Image (cartoon, rainbow, N blue to C red):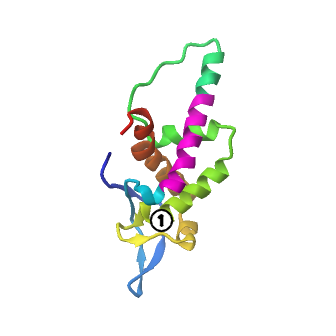
Amino acid sequence: MSDIINYELKKPFNYAYKGDTQEASFIALQPPTMKELTHITPIKQALMAAISQVSDTVDSSNTEAPIDDSKPTAAMMMAVLYRWDGDLNKLLLHAKELFKSGAGLIDGETKFTMPLIEKMDVKDFEAIVGEYIASFLAPSLMDGE
């Protein structure tokens, strides 16, 4: 499994750090551990359902879809999930809890709280969710890693 991935924020936000205000510049995404199992399992299930649904849609159309064997990307994962007819809001709530549990650290040190997550730009949050799925969860489903 991959090591820590640093995602550079497109829209930094301010947070309290050791008694001062600091501007967050990146989120360190940590590989999942058993501690996060209750949060990653529903995300993996949703991803599998979304991939299956999107594949069925492509298969049922009469057009040839190119097969992309490349490594999954954050944008690719989020695109598949946004096409899914499941409850994406519920998945995003699991992602918030996942990051609060320590899977994402602000500037590599500070644990997320709900008020800190709510300070994030939506695009940054979607990007870290997609990056986490593409880097840690999708490979474990596809390769058994």
**Residue for badge 1:** 101
Residue at 66%, 17% (x, y): give it.
60
Q: Quadrant of residue 55?
A: top right
Q: Give the amino acid at mark 1.
A: Ser
Q: Please state the extent of the stretch shown in magenta in the rendering.
A: 37-53
Q: Where is residue 48 shown, x and y percent of the image?
A: 55, 36
Tell me where residue 58 sits by quadrant.
top right
Percent of width and height locating residue 76? 50, 37
State whether the magenta stretch is mostly helix, strand or loop.
Answer: helix
Residue at position x 37%, y 57% in the image: 30
- Helix, strand or loop at disc 1? helix
- Name the spot of residue 122 as percent of width and height, x first: 57, 57
With respect to residue 89, does 74 lie above or below?
above
Q: Residue furthest bottom?
A: 19
Near mark 1 (Cα within 10 A), the count class, few <14, some 14-19 or many ≥20, is: some
Q: Which quadrant of the figure contains the N terminus?
A: top left
Q: Is residue 46 magenta?
A: yes
Q: Give left or right: position of 60 versus 116.
A: right
Tell whether position 2 is magenta: no
